[in-house]
Amino acid sequence: MTASARLLIVGPQGSGKGTQGVRIASAFGIPVVSTGDMFRANIKGGTELGQQVTAILDRGDLVPDELTGEIVRDRLSQDDAANGFLLDGYPRNAAQVGHLDEFLTARGEALDAVILLDVPREESIARLKLRADEQGRSDDTEEAIAHRLDIYENETAPILAVYGERGIVDSIDGVGSLDEITERIMSALSARGLTLAA
């Protein structure tokens, strides 16, 4: 028996949301639905979508809403997401919030919580530079990092306002050890009555 939880994890690039997302989803027995992972899989597979995405990312831009929404809706319709999911990278702006609301409302569902990993900009930049050195990622140049953080701050802040009005945002201090941050997230979700399956 899996626990039911419909979650969104939000944070600037380099906040560790990918790592924490996997940990939280595993604890609840739900899939991580990461737009970044789905895009990277297509890039690696050399698909037509992958080629489109590569060109967009190399410019330091984000993938268009329509394309992203289509991929996410298809993923959330799969059987393993029936009891819940953890979204990472979507929705990232007000238009996408509307699309997700429509999709979930039609299924009689809603998000249970939005986990905001709060990390200072300097910390994000330092972590991303380190990742670029370790993984040799072409999209992690200093200019591209700064551009993506600007987009995050301009586009994602408004979605936090929307979800904040609904009272479902948990702001988590994203600086500390992996275990400390995971513990903070689990405590916040537990306080919302989201408990793990026995």
Image (tube, rainbow, N blue to C red):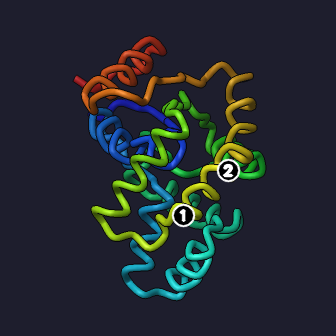
Q: Position of residue 71 (x, y in %)?
A: 56, 66
Q: The residue tagged with tag 2: helix, strand or loop?
A: helix
Q: Position of residue 23 (x, y in %)?
A: 29, 38
107 versus 147 height, above or below: above
Q: Residue furthest top?
A: 191
192 versus 57 height, above or below: above
- What residue did someone put label 2 on? 150
Viewer-nearest residue: 131 or 169: 131
Viewer-nearest residue: 151 or 108: 151
Viewer-nearest residue: 36 or 124: 124
Q: Quadrant of the C terminus?
A: top left
Q: CA distance from mark 2 to mark 1?
A: 29 Å
Viewer-nearest residue: 179 or 120: 120
x 45%, y 66%: residue = 38
How many numbered circles are shown? 2
Residue 143 lies left or right of residue 25; in this view the side is right
In which image quadrant can residue 37 be found? bottom left
Q: Position of residue 141 (x, y in %)?
A: 50, 66
Q: Residue 196's mark?
A: none
> Is disc 1 surrounded by few (<14), some (14 to 19) or many (20+) residues within 10 Å?
few
Q: The residue tagged with tag 1: helix, strand or loop?
A: helix
Under mark 2, the amino acid is: Asp
Under mark 1, the amino acid is: Asp
Q: Is residue 70 visible?
A: yes
Q: Residue 74's mark?
A: 1
> Is disc 2 surrounded by few (<14), some (14 to 19) or many (20+) residues within 10 Å?
some
